[in-house]
Structure formats: C-alpha cells, structure tokens
C-alpha cells in the first residue's frame, strides 16, 4: 500500500464497532478504517478504507441507544478526563482539551447511529458564552458565576437565567447553581434534579434531544452511580452502575430477557434490577438491595399516581424525585421519609400554574423563593 514502507508511527482504536488505523510518516498522516470490525473478527481478509490523509484527523461516532459518543484524534481516543464540551447554536460540540478549544464535531445533531463522521479543527466558532457538557453527551450551563439574572435571586436564592437560549430555574449559592435546578435547552432536551457548584451532582432526570432519557445519579456533571436509560419509546435500554459517564455494570439483562425470578418479579428483585408486582396491583421498577427498593426506581400505584426518583435502603423515598398525583399534577423536588419535604416545583394540572418554593409533607408551599 502506498507509503506503508515509510510508516514511522501507528495507532489503533475502536470507534464504536469500527476499527481505526492511523499511520504517520515523515510528512503526512493517513487514517484507515475497517468498517464494523467487531463483527468481522473471523474474516481472513478485512478491507481497509482510507478516510483521511492529514495530520489532524479527528473522527467521532454516536451511539444513539446509549446516548453516548466516541472521539478519536490521530488514531487514539481523546483523554476524556481532560476534555469538556461546549455547544454551538447548530448543535455541534466544541472539544476543549485542558480548557483550550481544539476541535468541532461537525454535523453532530444529525449524525446517524454508529456512522463515522469527520470533525474539524476549532476556528473561533464559539460565541462569547456557550453551554458546556460532558463525555456522556449531556449539556450543562457553563461554569460561571456571572449569570445574567432574568428574575429572582441568582446569587443566593432562587432565580432564573437565560444563557444562549438555555433557560435555568434553580437555587444559587455564591452565584453558582447549587441545590436544585430545572434546565430547558433550545434543542428540546431538559434536565431536572440536583446541582452542586454548577455541575449536575446527585439525583437527576435528563431527557436528550432525540427523546432518550437517563434517570439516576450524577457526579461532576457526568452519570455516576446507579442509573437507568430509556429510548424514545420509553423502553429500558440499560440499567446499572455508571462511572464518569460510562456504563460499567449492566444489571438489566434478566429483566430485558423477561426472566422471572418469582411469580411477582421479572429480573432480579433481590440484589439487582427488576420489576416487582405487589399483591394489590402496584408495581415497582428499579434497583433492589436485600429484597427492598433501593437507589433509583419508579413506583406505580393502581390509582394512576406514580413516583420516580431516589430511594434509601429499605424502600423509603428520600432525596430528589418526581411525583405524579391522581389528577396528573406533578411535583418535582425533595422527599424525606416517603413524603414531600423541601425545595421543589409544583405544576397543577387543572390550572396549568407552576409554583416554586419550599413545600411541607402535605404538598403545600410554605415558603417562596
């Protein structure tokens, strides 16, 4: 192959199911790809496709099912621990390495599942302010304490900001989002849940622009801890432990394969993930520990009310969650000992009115913000 005898350096990496082969000689770099390599391991001959002939080749592919994406620069995955992302108005992410903008993932919003796309070097495309995200393909307001406050108290209280079309209602501490936030993005995505110093941290619910969702725990802006992912049709695609934005332990196999561990349980309702049907017809779908509801789950009552959110060991609702009443009014906020208790927002179904504040254990607002 042209130039193979001059190759000084090579790098290999997977980009989803594909294999990238980057070859560097004295004057140029070339990137080849074996399409769908993981499914061709037994083939004697694996055809190479030349996809780039330069020294700054950056490629990415999206996993639309798991709401993730993978990025490779000159044949190696970027260092995600050093990377962060900001989004252009057209939805293309800008990759920052050590807080320096390096690349743009062009065509990102419309990229198809596991189709390899080529990015480009960064060329001052960002406006003065933008929205940041993490390697799990989720956006976050930028790490700043200089929000333009539209209403309320955006220093130490409850306020509302609008950052390039990203509308945030939340609690602030020393000028940073801290406590609770409800974030709406111009592409239709949204997040509601806990924040700490401008990063999602704690329990939260994220709906992506493609309709997929993640419900679970976060740390430093990334999925971290127990969590559940759903596709746009509301079907579970994974459930387990996440670490730094990646699923490291999938616990949903028995549930997804419709394996019953008892007449009442599909999946693992002892120490794992499953759905349990109670004698009165109520159901719980989520994680279990020591035969009890634990960490993250959804409880459906037969009267059409339901709760999705955090559980302590023992099956008690404690932490952030979303409760839907019989009349389909919705509360999103904090629970203590199985009852609403603390910061939250209530949307009343009959009137459509939305109320922010502190609520007591009867669901009544007792303090404004």
Image (cartoon, rainbow, N blue to C red):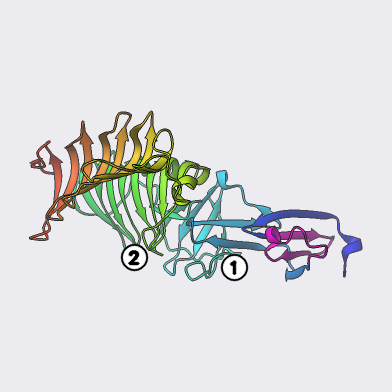
User: According to the image, label 1 marks what residue?
Assistant: 115
User: Does residue 338 sit above or below 46 in this rendering?
Assistant: above
Determine whether the residue tagged by mark 2 lies in a helix, strand or loop: loop
The 10 Å Cα crowd at callout 1, few under 14, some 14 to 19, many 20 or more, is: some
Q: Quadrant of residue 189?
A: bottom left
Most foreground residue, 136 or 37: 37
Q: Is residue 249 left or right of residue 262?
A: right
Viewer can see residue 154: no
Most foreground residue, 177 or 60: 60
Viewer can see residue 23: yes
Residue in the image at 15% along x and 55% along y: 328
Locate the C terminus by quadrant: top left
Q: Quadrant of residue 40?
A: bottom right
Residue segment shown in magenta = 20-46
User: Does residue 152 sit above or below 108 in this rendering?
Assistant: above
Most foreground residue, 365 or 55: 365
Residue 214 image point, x, y percent: 39, 51
User: Does residue 292 sit above or below 325 in this rendering?
Assistant: above
Q: Is residue 18 magenta?
A: no
Locate the N terminus by quadrant: bottom right
User: According to the image, label 2 marks what residue?
Assistant: 186
């Amino acid at each position: 192959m042209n130039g193979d005898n001059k190759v000084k350096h090579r790098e290999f990496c997977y980009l989803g199911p594909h294999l990238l082969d980057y070859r560097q000689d004295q004057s140029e770099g070339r990137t080849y790809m074996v399409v769908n390599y993981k499914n061709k391991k037994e083939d004697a001959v694996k055809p190479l496709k030349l996809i780039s002939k330069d020294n700054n080749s950056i490629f990415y592919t999206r996993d639309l099912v798991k709401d993730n994406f993978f990025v490779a620069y000159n044949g190696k995955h970027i260092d995600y621990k050093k990377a962060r992302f900001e989004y252009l108005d057209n939805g293309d992410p800008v990759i920052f390495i050590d807080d320096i903008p390096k690349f743009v993932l062009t065509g990102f919003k419309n990229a198809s599942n596991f189709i390899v796309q080529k990015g480009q070097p960064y060329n001052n495309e960002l406006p003065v302010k933008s929205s940041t995200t993490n390697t799990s393909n989720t956006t976050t307001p930028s790490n700043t304490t200089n929000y333009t406050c539209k209403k309320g108290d955006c220093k130490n209280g409850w306020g509302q900001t609008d950052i390039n079309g990203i509308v945030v209602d939340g609690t602030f501490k020393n000028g940073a989002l801290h406590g609770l936030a409800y974030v709406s993005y111009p592409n239709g995505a949204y997040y509601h849940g806990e924040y700490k110093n401008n990063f999602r941290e704690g329990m939260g619910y994220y709906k992506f622009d493609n309709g997929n969702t993640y419900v679970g725990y976060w740390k430093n802006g990334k999925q971290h801890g127990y969590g559940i992912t759903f596709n746009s049709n509301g079907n579970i695609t994974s459930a387990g432990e996440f670490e730094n934005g990646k699923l490291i332990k999938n616990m949903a196999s028995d549930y997804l394969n419709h394996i019953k561990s008892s007449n009442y349980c599909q999946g693992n309702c002892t120490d794992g993930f499953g759905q349990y049907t109670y004698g009165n017809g109520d159901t719980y779908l989520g994680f279990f520990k020591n035969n009890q509801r634990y960490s993250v789950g959804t409880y459906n009552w037969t009267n059409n009310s339901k709760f999705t959110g955090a559980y302590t060991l023992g099956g008690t609702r404690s932490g952030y969650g979303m409760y839907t009443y019989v009349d389909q009014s919705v509360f999103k906020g904090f629970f203590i000992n199985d009852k609403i208790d603390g910061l939250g927002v209530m949307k009343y179904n009959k009137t459509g009115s939305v109320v922010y504040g502190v609520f007591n254990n009867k669901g009544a607002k007792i303090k404004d913000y």
